[in-house]
């Protein structure tokens, strides 16, 4: 008899509606995603960009050791991982933005020439801020965006986790994307205006 | 039905219609509620706008964010990372503590950014390590150690200097010309010492010339430019990285970097310390602009080089 992995057990419990399973799951998912990111970075493929959703999917295959992928369990896992991935990305971007603003002394050399492209940190913060605004406005849509863009989940997978009809998920996602794009556009415009002042 | 629900249902009803159809249906559904109509239309515009993509916004930054694992609190070799103190194109600098049984020492831990050709950096570090370790001068920040993090990224441990960049120090303490020159002579002494040991700095600029509270200069990052392969022995011109405001023509043009490169940069720094203005413009941020500028220098015969750098050169060599 095969002893189930703690992750698989937690996912089973989560599917049964046990919310405490989430707390057991998060540290594993976090650790695995970090490890994977490190692994990919070591490969040093030139021009290689890390796809967060690809990492999330790979984390699933590494953590779940059953040979038959269980659709229900997989969807739940991806939902959790999407949230963790968003946390990882935004926490770091925020910390780095703060470090950039806060450090009076920049010691490292060759920075003036190379620093410009790194302004993109603020983009992820802007995405997260806009997403938080969406969550306030319409929590379900916020969750769907998180699943889609940070977890790489299909509409079917989201529909499965949220126990909602697929057409509803599709239209919710479409509205959510339009709302978020409009919000991002506004924020980018006001950031540019602020920078020009 | 609240507003947001009306907006959503009208959006869904009109999103896939042709322009003319859409107008008609919007007229019908929104009536004279202009706020509602504006809300729906702005969402429809965003829906069809392909210039903003959430995907690329997130994935574009994912690599840069994941690229810099949170190291604070972690252990790298014998060092414990305390906080990030700087960040640049080549990587990040952390304040770290070396915890030995005997004593605790603060170091600046420079962690090289990924994609900097790790293997080459490490190979050069092994070649240069002894030379850099031997660079023992009170005005030069010591290089203690180097290696790779658990992720396989090269790092260097250097003396942690508490101080201010030389230009800031002069300004804050309102140093007169005489004091600035005296300070600068100490800087020259340190550079001359390194040159006697055949080590070129390669990226001298105020941000690398720190001055401690006691007024003692400390040169940072000696030899780092070479380890990074940013000296012009790098085969590709694009890989060159230097600081335009202080770069010498040979750096810009990608020809051989020698001790004269440092002298040139020192001249640019001294010019700035004495005149309050940059010796050369900083807006030369593209290789093409730099190359053009350099071609002009060669034609014009670099007046300030003759006035300032050569006398320094003559004094020390």
Image: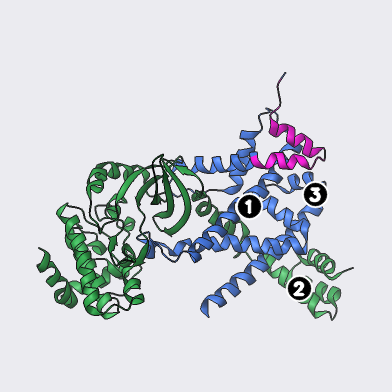
Chain colours: A blue, B green
Few, some or many residues within 10 Å of mark 3 (<14, 14–19, 20+)? some
The reply, left or right, for residue B167 in relation to residue B87 is left
Q: Which residues are magenta?
A: A2-27
Label 3 sits on residue:
A166
Sequence-wise, the earlier of marks 1 and 3 is 1
Label 2 sits on residue:
B39
- Work out whether disc 1 and disc 3 sit on a shared chain: yes
Q: CA distance from mark 2 to mark 3?
A: 26 Å
Q: Secondary structure at mark 3?
A: helix
> Residue A126 at x, y = what percent?
61, 64
Label 1 sits on residue:
A87
Depth order, front residue of A30/A101:
A101
Q: Are marks 1 and 3 in contact (CB under 8 Å)?
A: no
Please tell me which residue is depicted at 30% across the width and 53% down the height of the picture.
Answer: B224
Chain for disc number 1: A
Residue A7 lies in the magenta-colored region:
yes
């Amino acid at each position: 008899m095969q002893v189930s992995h703690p992750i698989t057990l937690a996912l089973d419990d989560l599917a049964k509606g046990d919310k405490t399973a989430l707390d057991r799951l998060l540290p594993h998912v976090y650790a695995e995603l970090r490890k994977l990111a490190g692994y990919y970075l070591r490969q040093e493929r030139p021009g290689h960009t890390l796809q967060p959703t690809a990492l999330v999917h790979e984390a699933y295959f590494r953590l779940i050791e059953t040979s038959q992928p269980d659709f229900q369990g997989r969807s739940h896992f991806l939902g959790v991982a999407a949230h963790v991935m968003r946390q990882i990305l935004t926490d770091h971007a925020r910390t780095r933005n703060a470090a950039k603003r806060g450090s009076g002394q920049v010691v490292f050399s060759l920075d003036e020439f190379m620093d410009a492209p790194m302004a993109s940190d603020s983009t992820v913060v802007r995405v997260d801020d806009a997403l938080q605004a969406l969550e306030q406005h319409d929590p379900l849509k916020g969750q769907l965006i998180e699943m889609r863009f940070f977890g790489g989940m299909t509409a079917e997978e989201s529909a499965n986790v949220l126990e909602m009809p697929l057409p509803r998920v599709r239209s919710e996602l479409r509205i959510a994307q339009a709302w978020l794009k409009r919000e991002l556009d506004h924020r980018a415009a006001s950031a540019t205006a602020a920078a020009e002042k | 039905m609240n507003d947001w629900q009306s907006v959503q249902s009208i959006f869904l009803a009109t999103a896939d219609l042709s322009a003319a159809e859409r107008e008609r249906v919007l007229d019908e559904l929104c009536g004279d509620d202009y706020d509602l109509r504006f809300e729906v239309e702005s969402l429809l515009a965003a829906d069809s706008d392909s210039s903003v993509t959430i995907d690329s916004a997130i994935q574009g930054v994912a690599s840069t964010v994941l690229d810099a694992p949170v190291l604070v609190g972690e252990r790298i070799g014998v060092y414990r990372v305390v906080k990030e103190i700087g960040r640049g194109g080549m990587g990040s600098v952390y304040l770290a503590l070396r915890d030995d049984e005997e004593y605790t020492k603060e170091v600046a831990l420079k962690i090289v950014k990924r994609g900097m050709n790790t293997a080459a950096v490490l190979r050069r570090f092994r070649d240069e390590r002894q030379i850099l370790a031997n660079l023992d001068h009170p005005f030069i920040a010591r290089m203690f150690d180097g290696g790779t993090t658990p992720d396989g990224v090269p790092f260097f441990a250097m003396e942690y200097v508490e101080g201010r960049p030389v230009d800031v120090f002069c300004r804050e303490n309102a140093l007169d010309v005489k004091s600035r020159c005296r300070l600068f002579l100490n800087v020259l002494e340190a550079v001359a010492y390194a040159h006697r040991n055949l080590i070129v700095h390669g990226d001298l600029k105020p941000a690398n010339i720190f001055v401690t509270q006691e007024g003692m200069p400390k040169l940072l990052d000696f030899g780092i430019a070479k380890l990074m392969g940013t000296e012009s022995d790098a085969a590709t011109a694009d890989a060159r990285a230097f600081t335009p405001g202080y770069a010498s023509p040979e750096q810009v043009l990608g020809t051989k970097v020698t001790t004269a490169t440092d002298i040139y940069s020192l001249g640019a720094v001294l010019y700035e310390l004495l005149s309050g203005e940059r010796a050369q413009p900083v807006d030369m941020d593209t290789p093409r602009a730099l190359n053009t500028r350099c071609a002009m220098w060669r034609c014009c015969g670099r007046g300030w080089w003759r006035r300032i750098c050569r006398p320094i050169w003559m004094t020390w060599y």
